Amino acid sequence: MLKFSKYHALGNVYIVVNPEQLTADISTAMIKNICHKNYGISSDGLLIGPLTSSVADFALRIFNPDGSEAEKSGNGLRIFCRYLWDEKLVGADPFFIETKGGIVRAQVFDQGHIVKVEMGAVSFASTKIPVVGDARDVLLEDIEIKEHRLTFSAATIGNPHCVVLVNNPTAELARELGPLLENHANFPNRTNVQFVKVLNRSAIQIEIWERGAGYTLASGSSSCAAASVAHKLGLCDQRVKVHMPGGEIDIEISADFFVTMQGSVTAICHGDISSECLQQTM
């Protein structure tokens, strides 16, 4: 049996497993089994933590449901913070978490229901995201997908994002074009994709296709990237409310594009995953 905790952040679901439960490194097959909506317990990703860190209070590994490892996840981080609160490993004071995509500072409010995360600095530099071609800030570039000619900007906040401005972001559009953009040759490490409509100076609407996970109702890092691109292009101010199918996240962007995210987390359940589930072959 493998003990787990399950939470959602605006409909984006993650499973948390304490590494003390693991006798060896978790395998790609096990991750796929756990996250599968039919053969497992259904999740948009798996969080392994808390791990020890020499540079932060805790370390965290984040896995997509296809078994690939993510550098950073805003919703995953908020969920992990809620887990730390529930396990009485943190209190009301700020604390630091090391991820593959950098160190973040976090704080829990409202008995764990609201979490603020200082996600770090956004970069639009092609060499950091990465995006192929000459070194540049990747802003308002053209790309052709199927019969569509799109205008995109790219950003990283520890993980890569492709932000596409559209008049009408829909789930159908994200499902149709998201996987094509995720795996486009422009993005050597693949990319997360956001289809964005600017509503006003302080609000945007987005639909999301997540790298390694697919269509999702909400994403913290996607919210950070989309809001930062909108601000960089002069379309939004420094405080942006991001509207997604799963709910809303508040983003604050500093003068040097350091981004802070705040949003809710909801506990779903705690339990045991059977060894039969973990060992199955699909």
Image (cartoon, rainbow, N blue to C red):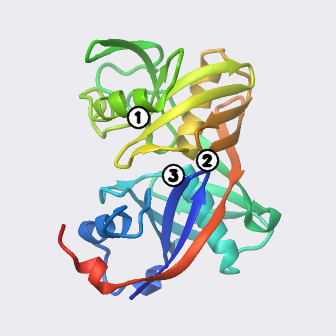
* Inter-mark Cα distance, 1 to 2: 16 Å
Mark 3 vs 1, N-terminal side: 3
Left or right of 267? Residue 71 is: left
Residue 51 visible in the shown view: no
Question: Mark 3: which amino acid?
Answer: Ser
Give the residue number, with chain letter if any, for mark 1: 129
**10 Å neighbourhood of mark 3: few (<14), some, or many (≥20)?**
many
Give the residue number, with chain letter if any, for mark 3: 73
Mark 1 vs 2, N-terminal side: 2
Marks 3,1: beta carbons within 8 A: no
Q: Depth-wise, is mark 2 or mark 3 nearer the camera?
A: 3
**Label ID, residue 119:** 2
Question: Mark 1: which amino acid?
Answer: Ile
Left or right of 267? Residue 138 is: left
Percent position (x, y) of residue 226?
Answer: 56, 30
Mark 1 lies on a secondary structure that is loop
22 versus 261 height, above or below: below
Question: Mark 2: which amino acid?
Answer: Met
**10 Å neighbourhood of mark 1: few (<14), some, or many (≥20)?**
many
119 versus 109 height, above or below: above
Identify which residue, 192 or 268, lies in the foreground.
268
* Inter-mark Cα distance, 2 to 3: 9 Å
56 versus 66 height, above or below: below
Identify which residue, 213 or 56, lies in the foreground.
213
Percent position (x, y) of residue 255?
Answer: 71, 28
Q: Depth-wise, is mark 3 or mark 1 nearer the camera?
A: 3
Picture quarter with the N terminus: bottom left
Mark 2 lies on a secondary structure that is strand
Left or right of 161? Residue 6 is: right
Left or right of 218? Residue 179 is: left
Percent position (x, y) of residue 209?
Answer: 42, 38
Residue at left 56%, top 31%? 206
